[in-house]
Image (cartoon, rainbow, N blue to C red):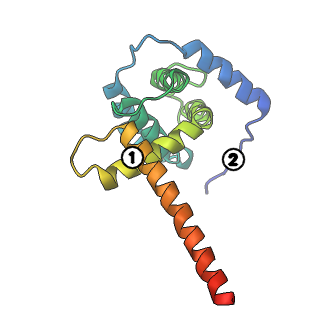
Amino acid sequence: MSTKYNIDITNEVTNHFNQVLKQYNSNNNTVKLQHVKKMLGQLKDSKEEYVLMHIEPLNQMLQIYSDNQWQMTQQTKNTIYAAFSYLLQEDDLIPDTIPVIGLLDDCIVIDIAINKIYQELTSFRDFSRCRTVYAKGKQFAVNDWSKIKKFEATSHLRNRRNRRNSLSNLLR
């Protein structure tokens, strides 16, 4: 028989972890991405559902952090760096060696970091999808993405205007 627990993350807990992230926030890039990738692999072996739910967000943070074409803001870089630094600490608020709950604090930090960088992460995912469609093995930069976004927006407006005109012609 298994027992299930629910935890509500209050503003007080969020504020505490925001302070923790500020402590880890640094321009010193001593975090090795291969260590984060190794940790990601270890998390995939977890049996805890709450840990498994954080693999994709952590993977997205790793992708945006390591993509040389994406020009992330310094604030986003600092937030991701702080989350990675905290994640790599085995002896943090709840030591990672404690069965079942050892990674709970790490997952909370991942959630807070994702919430802080949500807008930029959404733009990065859009950029990545666009790059997949349009790059076709060639170099693809943020400027290329901006041009395509502008073209697609103009095209969308033109199509909407044409549909509206066609509809009004039918109603005459």
Specify few, some or many for label 2: CA neighbours under 10 Å numbering under 14, 14-19, or 20 or more: few
Q: Does dot 2 land on a helix, a strand or a loop?
A: loop
Identify the residue at image location x=65%, y=51%.
3
Residue displayed at 39% across by 37% down: 142
Residue 9 relative to residue 142: left or right: right
Which disc is residue 25 wearing? none
Q: Can residue 54 be seen in this snapshot?
A: no
* Residue 47, horizontal then vertical, whole percent: 47, 47
Residue at x-position 45% and y-position 53%: 151
* Count of numbered labels shown in the rendering: 2
> Which residue matches tag 1?
128
Judging depth in this view, the residue of 35 and 145 nearest the camera is: 145
Which residue is at a point 53% across and 64% down the rendered structure image?
Answer: 158
| Left or right relative to 21: residue 125 | left
Q: State if disc 1 and disc 2 touch (CB < 8 Å).
A: no
Q: Which of the labelled discs sits on residue 5, or is there none?
A: 2
- Do we see residue 103 in this rendering? yes
Can you say whether 126 is above or below 152 in the image? above
- CA distance separating discs 2 and 1: 37 Å
Q: Quadrant of residue 165?
A: bottom right
Residue 16 image offset from top left, x and y in percent: 71, 22
Left or right: 134, with 28 as reference point = left
Q: Quadrant of the C terminus?
A: bottom right
Identity, as a three-letter code, of the amino acid under mark 2: Tyr
